[in-house]
Image: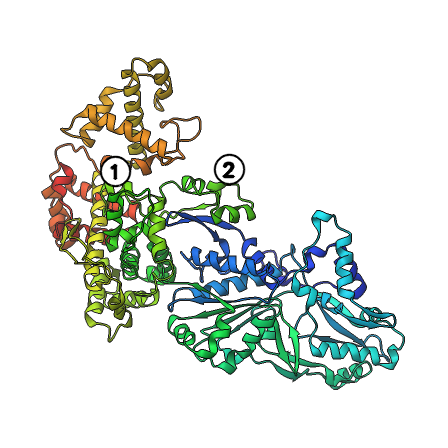
């Protein structure tokens, strides 16, 4: 190897795993039995948890988000986003199966096409395969070791296609000279006799009763009757002929993991083991080579692991699913007029139409009684759908100049097509009439943003859970301390892409105050099993985006072009686009949605309602206009976000201090409580900075009663603190704290400050607007403008690119669009 060459040898530095004799294995088993009695469900549940987790807040409720579903195996290529609630149900069912004494239940993942069902199972099988290779866990099986009598160096190894656990070599019943014995039961009792009473091993029912398949039993019987083995005990036979080896599961080799696309492939077949004449000669010295036939089929390959049946009910007939019916009924499969125990977790993925058809077949009843359905519908969380689009459409970002809002707006529309209108009749007793009315009157865009929004205070959400909530038990099993704030923050998963309710522009401040965790949970639970079955799929959405690219200028992909393509698709109707048929199936309110405004756009009663796909295109365009209005204003005023936050913290702290000073009776107690150290001067401040407060109030409450505004802010602080929404770091005040929820609570005031600009009086909004039009359409005229105007123009464009990820070209296109359609008025912004 040369000095600069790459040594590839370490990449393939694999050697066959350890093998051992039967007696050595028995010693290992007795010394460390915990690793030897895993059932398939136990193995799968542990594999999922082994690779770690995060905690996500979905609709006001914490859920465990296991790392494997972000596809840690293939750099996220097959990642599943936003399906944590369905995955939680799946993992819970698998976990519970391991605690049952009867045969395993089948699991059906049920949902529309492209909802992520197959990806969920594929990632679980990948986790199981990788976990089986981990040093912290060992899987054992056995094979036969036939030695040539004439030449001991020649050996033939024959493996069972079942990869049985060697524990099954201990038969359940054995006829001996002194009568009937139960070797496996005695072994298990011996293992437990060496353990303390409180540490007795819980042996799964499978390992107490399971037996080897007919071929293995025939081989062992033949070895016992072979004259050359006369007088040898069964243990001695095993010691001579059995080798125990560590095994690994494999998707590619169908070892412990089996994936099929039809129930017709459940049949098991017998096939002769291919051997050379020399090997047959050696085997015939010990047993008849005719016994060395293999069983082949998905049920055999999946033994000890997982069997995944894709779209299983599409061609399901009574005969095709009979093997599965037997497995789920008895834990056994039929082989050559005999039965063999199989330990397999069966997961079926199917779409709604095929499942509905199967439900109505009279012959399906027995199987339906033995399966558990778990819905996996289209995403209702637009933030998660953005992640899918980013991944699946990443190639277009490499080839085209893509509007940074494209994926968000596409996701907003797709989720709104899937939502059902709130219509519940019963509410929690603590809800006010105002809250109930607001719930029932939600518009599609409001419901979409509630599902997509960031949690206000995830720590408070977790800690406020009732003692009986399942998440507490789940966290306990994972060793997560819900009272350790540092540990909680370490595992919390909050997307930076998720909008906040305060800033999305479709709620009033009064409405935001009504949306607490209880509100979110009730909203999600109303249609927990149904919502998300209708509407556009992610695949259809991507098709529309691809058509947008085809119809573009070949360089830039703008939100406007996508919305135009979307309108065209809706106009073409359901004869060309099947998902549009769903609009007829939506449940309607007793009354139409009320008239409303979204930004500058006005909607009459019933317009843009749930299922009104045509006008939902208009709604998502209005939401887009709100978004770019906010972006352009912030880019134009050019305020530093960090300094703005510091200013607001100082104002609220000063307002609290001012109120403490006014309270003469308790000022000696209250003033020290709200005094602070100025971060710039380092001086301790015990009196409110009145001039500074007035400067802030000129922006936040111009012309209003300033004293009343200060008291209102102070009162809001106390209410947020008492309700748990505002949590300041222990031992700190607003000025010294950083990891808290301050900005969430005072988001409106923060945005008002961030959007304010004190100009030098030389910049005219009309002139600035013309500058953008000149730069876009008349570059020569743009160059004739005053340097100050061009500098200001370039600064705004720079802020758009720096803060929001625009290219310079699309930033200019977006600003010109907003000015032309009167979405933003720069004169008003600058004044």
Q: Where is residue 574 shown, x and y percent of the image?
A: 24, 73
- Which residue: 27% across, 16% down? 662
Q: Is residue 12 visible?
A: yes
**Secondary structure type for disc 1:** helix
Residue position for label 2 = 484
Report the coloring of the rendering: rainbow
Mark nearer the N terminus (2 vs 1): 2
Crowding at dot 1, Cα within 10 Å, few <14 / some 14-19 / many 20+, comes out as some
Check contact, mark 2 vs mark 1: CB within 8 A.
no
Task: Decide if residue 628 is on the left or right side of residue 523.
Answer: left
For the N terminus, the quadrant is bottom right
Q: Of 657 and 181, which appears nearest the observer?
A: 181
Q: Eyeballing the image, is 459 above or below 369?
A: above
Task: Decide if residue 419 is on the left or right side of residue 461.
Answer: left
Task: Decide if residue 583 is on the left or right side of residue 181.
Answer: left
Q: Is residue 25 visible?
A: no
Q: Where is residue 601 shown, x and y percent of the image?
A: 14, 52
Q: Of 587 and 387, which appears nearest the observer?
A: 587
Using the image, tell me which numbered label, if any, was put on residue 635.
none
- What is the CA distance from the residue labelled 2 to the residue labelled 1? 31 Å
Residue position for label 1 = 748
Q: Quadrant of residue 689?
A: top left
Q: Eyeballing the image, is 287 above or below 92?
A: below
For the C terminus, the quadrant is top left
Q: Where is residue 583 shown, x and y percent of the image?
A: 25, 66
Q: How many marks?
A: 2
Q: Where is residue 148 shown, x and y percent of the image?
A: 83, 79
Q: Of 799 and 225, which appears nearest the observer?
A: 225
**Secondary structure type for disc 2:** loop
Query: Which mark is nearer the camera, 2 or 1?
Result: 2
- Which residue: 12% across, 34% down? 762
């Amino acid at each position: 190897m040369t000095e600069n060459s790459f040594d590839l040898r370490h990449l393939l530095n694999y050697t066959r795993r350890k093998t051992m004799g039967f007696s050595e294995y028995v010693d290992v088993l007795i010394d460390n039995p915990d690793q030897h009695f895993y059932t398939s469900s136990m193995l799968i549940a542990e594999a999922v948890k082994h690779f770690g987790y995060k905690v996500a807040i979905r609709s006001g409720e914490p859920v465990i988000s296991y790392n494997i579903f972000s596809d840690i195996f293939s750099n996220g290529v097959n990642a599943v986003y936003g399906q944590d609630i369905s995955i939680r149900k799946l993992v819970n069912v698998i976990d519970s199966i391991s605690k049952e004494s009867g045969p395993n239940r089948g699991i059906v993942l049920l949902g529309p096409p492209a909802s992520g069902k197959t990806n969920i199972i594929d990632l679980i099988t990948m986790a199981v395969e990788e976990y089986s290779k981990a040093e912290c866990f060992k899987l054992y099986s056995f094979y036969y070791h036939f030695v040539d009598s004439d030449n001991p160096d020649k050996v033939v190894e024959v493996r069972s296609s079942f990869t049985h656990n060697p524990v099954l070599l201990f038969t359940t019943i054995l006829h001996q000279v002194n009568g009937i014995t139960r070797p496996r039961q005695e072994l298990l009792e011996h293992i437990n006799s060496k353990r303390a009473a409180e540490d007795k091993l819980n042996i799964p029912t499978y390992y107490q009763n399971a037996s080897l398949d007919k071929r293995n039993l025939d081989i062992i019987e033949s070895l016992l009757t072979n004259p050359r083995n006369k007088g040898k005990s069964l243990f001695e036979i095993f010691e001579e002929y059995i080798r125990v080896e560590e095994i690994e599961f494999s998707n590619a080799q169908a070892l412990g993991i089996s994936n099929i696309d039809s129930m017709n492939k459940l049949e098991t077949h017998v096939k002769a083991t291919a051997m050379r004449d020399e090997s047959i000669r050696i085997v015939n010295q010990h047993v008849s080579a005719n016994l060395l036939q293999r069983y082949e089929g998905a049920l055999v390959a999946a033994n000890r692991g997982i069997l995944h049946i894709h779209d299983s009910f599409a061609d399901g007939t009574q005969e095709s699913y009979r093997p599965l019916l037997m497995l789920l009924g008895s834990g056994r499969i039929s082989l050559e007029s005999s039965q063999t125990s199989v330990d397999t977790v069966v997961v079926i993925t199917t779409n709604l139409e095929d499942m509905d058809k199967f439900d109505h077949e009279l012959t399906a009843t027995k199987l339906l009684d033995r399966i558990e359905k778990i819905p996996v519908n289209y995403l209702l969380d637009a933030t998660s759908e953005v992640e899918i689009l980013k991944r699946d459409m990443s190639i277009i970002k490499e080839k085209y100049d893509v509007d940074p809002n494209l994926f968000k707006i596409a996701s907003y529309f797709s989720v709104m097509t899937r939502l059902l209108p709130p219509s519940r009749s019963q509410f929690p007793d603590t809800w006010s009439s105002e809250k109930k009315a607001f719930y029932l009157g939600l518009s599609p865009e409001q419901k979409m943003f509630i599902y997509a929004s960031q949690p206000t205070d995830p720590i408070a959400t977790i800690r406020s859970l009732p003692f009986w909530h399942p998440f507490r038990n789940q966290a306990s099993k994972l060793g997560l301390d819900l009272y350790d704030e540092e540990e909680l923050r370490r595992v919390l998963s909050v997307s930076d892409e998720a909008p906040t309710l305060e800033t999305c522009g479709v709620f009033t401040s009064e409405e935001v105050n009504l949306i607490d965790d209880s509100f979110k949970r009730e909203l999600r639970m109303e249609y927990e099993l149904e919502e998300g079955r209708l509407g556009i799929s992610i695949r259809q959405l991507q098709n529309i985006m691809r058509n947008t690219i085809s119809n573009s200028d070949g360089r830039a992909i703008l939100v406007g072009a996508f919305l135009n393509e979307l309108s065209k698709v809706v106009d073409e109707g359901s004869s060309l686009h099947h998902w549009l048929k769903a609009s007829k199936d939506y449940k309607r309110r007793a009354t139409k949605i009320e008239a409303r405004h979204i930004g500058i756009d006005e909607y009459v009663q019933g317009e843009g309602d749930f299922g009104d796909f045509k006008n939902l295109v208009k709604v998502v365009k209005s939401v887009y206009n709100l978004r770019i209005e906010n972006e352009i204003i912030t880019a134009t005023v050019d305020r530093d976000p960090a300094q703005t936050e510091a200013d607001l913290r100082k104002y609220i702290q000063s307002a609290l201090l001012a109120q403490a000073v006014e309270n003469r009776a308790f000022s000696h107690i209250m003033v020290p409580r709200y005094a602070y150290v100025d971060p710039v001067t380092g001086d301790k401040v015990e009196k409110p900075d009145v001039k500074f407060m007035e400067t802030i109030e000129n922006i936040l409450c111009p012309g209003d009663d300033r004293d009343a505004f200060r008291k209102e802010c102070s009162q809001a602080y106390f209410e947020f603190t008492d309700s748990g929404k505002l949590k300041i770091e222990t031992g700190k005040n607003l000025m010294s704290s950083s990891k808290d929820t301050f900005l969430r609570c005072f988001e409106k005031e923060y945005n008002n400050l961030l959007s304010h600009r004190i100009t030098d009086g030389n910049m005219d909004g009309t002139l600035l607007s013309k500058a953008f039009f000149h730069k876009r359409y008349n570059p020569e005229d743009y160059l004739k403008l005053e340097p100050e105007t061009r500098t200001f123009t370039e600064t705004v464009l720079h802020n758009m690119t720096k803060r929001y990820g625009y290219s310079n070209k699309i930033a200019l296109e977006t600003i010109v669009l907003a000015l032309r359609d009167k979405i933003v008025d720069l004169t008003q912004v600058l004044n």
